[in-house]
Each structure stands twice: as structure tokens, then as C-alpha cells.
Image (cartoon, helix red, strand yellow):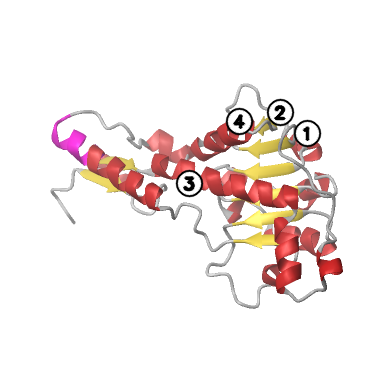
């Protein structure tokens, strides 16, 4: 099929659904526009972080749910991002963009990533962070990276931010923690998408939800298109691809 195919250029991030061993054996080059998504997803993760710190989601849920003003204004302790201990799981492109944003606002960042030189153990990160932001790739070894044991390490009142993949978090374990009211969470990704209308996440006042749209900005879409057009132009001119995907790199990508 497609005997003349020489280049696969994807406007999204993961190319795993499109790449097979046969593709590599034929010498087809592969590229993707994941770099174009990093800023927009990082900004949503930042927005989630600020919302959790300031309990915006709880206030919104209470007021929209019809609670009296005196009841709606009650919330757990709120915090500023300045000096806030924020743990980042995965120094991916999006993870690094998020780190830059929260550090610029004065956060105290710690990182868990086996490939990062300043990383700390995951258990230590979970136990010492007020906000934990997940930015790791979806790999066999990261399946339910945060399960019942790991989530229990998070301090009372902490918040979990996931704009990466639900693959990384045991959804049932997270649901149990949220139902207890011990921690809060902001999520853009779910095990089942679309998220069912009756899913318990939808009714929890300590859960902030968006429908997998973190990369949906106008600017992001334009960047993704620009990346692919640029890569096609480089390929046509016989130049090396700037965002080439190799078999070795694919094994480490989500």
C-alpha cells in the first residue's frame, strides 16, 4: 500500500497509531508536531494549579449548586503559588514548559523523572508537594504510575493536575481519594472519553474537569500546522527533519 510513501507527518503528538515495523523497513521518515502543543497544555496545567490553590472550583460548584452564600464561601485553606511546593512528574516538553511557567511565578519546583539530573524519588515528591502535576509519557512502565499507595502519600489538602493521559493515574483510586474529600484534582483526560454523563467525577465539588481540550487553542493549532508544513518543506528540499521520530525515540514517547 502507498508504495511511493516517503514521509509521515502528523499534526498531533503521538504517531504510534500510524507507525509499524514495515514503515521503518521501507525507510519512510516520520515527524510530528508535538512541540506545538507544549505551551497551550502547560498553560492549562498552570490554570488548573491556580484554581486548585485558590479553591476556585469548589466556590464555583457551591454557587452554581444553589448553596447559600455563607455555605458557599466555606472552603479548605487557600494558598498562593509564590513559594508553593509543586511536584512535576515527567520533564517532557510540556512538563518543561509548565516548570518554566510556575517557576516564573515563584513556585518551589521538584521533579520526578528518571532522565532528569536533578530528579528526586517519586515518593518524596508526592509526600512534599502541595500540587502534583503529571506530564509523563504513556508507556508500559507508567501504567497507573499513581495508584492507591502513591495517592495516599499526598498530603491532606494537596491537589493533582493531569493534562497528560489518564493511563498514568489509577482512576478508581483517585475517585476514592476525591470522595473522601482529602485531596482535590483537576483533569483534562479520562479512562473513558467522552466522560459519561453519569460519571461520579462530574458531581464532586473537589474535582475540576475539562473535556480533553488543553491543546485546543487557536495558537496551538497554528503552531502544529506550521511545524508540519515546515517539515514537509525540509523533506522536499532534502534537509534533515527538525522533529524526526526514530524507532528508539518512539519507544520513549507516549
* Mark closer to the chain start, 2 or 4: 4
Secondary structure under tag 3 reads helix
Mark 1 to mark 2: distance in Å? 7 Å
Is 172 placed above or below 223 here?
below
Mark 1 to mark 3: distance in Å? 28 Å
Residue 215 screen position, x and y as percent: 46, 52
The disc at residue 104 is 4
Q: Nearer the viewer, residue 240 or 139?
A: 240
152 relative position to 209: left or right: right
Residue occupied by mark 3: 40
Q: Write down the region rendered in magenta.
A: 231-238
* Mark closer to the chain start, 4 or 1: 4
The disc at residue 124 is 1
Is 213 placed above or below 31 here?
below
Is 234 colored magenta in this rendering?
yes
Mark 4 to mark 1: distance in Å? 23 Å
* Mark closer to the chain start, 1 or 3: 3
Residue occupied by mark 2: 120
* Mark closer to the chain start, 2 or 3: 3
Amino acid at each position: 500500500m502507498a508504495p511511493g510513501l516517503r514521509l509521515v507527518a502528523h499534526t498531533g503528538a503521538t504517531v504510534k497509531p500510524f507507525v509499524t515495523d514495515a514503515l521503518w523497513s521501507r525507510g519512510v521518515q516520520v515527524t510530528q508536531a508535538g512541540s506545538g502543543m507544549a505551551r497551550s497544555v502547560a498553560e492549562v496545567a498552570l490554570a488548573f494549579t491556580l484554581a486548585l490553590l485558590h479553591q476556585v472550583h469548589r466556590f464555583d460548584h457551591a454557587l452554581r449548586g444553589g448553596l447559600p452564600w455563607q455555605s458557599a464561601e466555606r472552603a479548605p485553606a487557600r494558598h498562593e503559588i509564590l513559594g508553593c511546593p509543586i511536584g512535576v512528574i515527567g520533564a517532557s516538553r510540556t512538563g518543561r514548559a509548565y516548570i518554566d511557567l510556575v517557576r516564573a511565578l515563584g513556585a518551589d519546583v521538584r521533579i520526578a523523572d528518571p532522565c532528569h539530573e536533578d530528579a528526586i524519588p517519586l515518593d518524596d515528591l508526592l509526600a512534599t508537594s502541595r500540587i502534583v502535576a503529571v506530564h509523563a509519557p504513556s508507556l508500559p512502565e507508567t501504567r497507573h504510575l499513581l495508584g492507591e499507595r502513591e495517592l495516599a502519600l499526598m498530603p491532606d489538602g494537596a491537589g493533582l493536575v493531569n493534562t497528560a493521559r489518564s493511563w498514568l493515574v489509577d482512576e478508581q483510586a483517585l475517585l476514592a481519594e476525591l470522595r473522601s474529600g482529602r485531596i482535590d484534582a483537576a483533569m483534562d483526560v479520562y479512562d473513558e472519553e467522552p466522560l459519561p454523563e453519569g460519571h461520579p467525577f462530574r458531581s464532586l465539588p473537589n474535582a475540576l474537569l475539562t473535556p480533553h481540550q488543553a491543546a485546543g487553542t487557536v495558537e496551538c493549532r497554528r503552531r502544529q500546522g506550521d511545524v508540519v508544513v515546515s517539515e514537509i518543506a525540509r523533506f522536499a528540499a532534502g534537509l534533515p527533519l527538525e522533529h524526526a521520530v526514530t524507532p528508539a525515540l518512539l519507544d520513549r514517547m507516549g
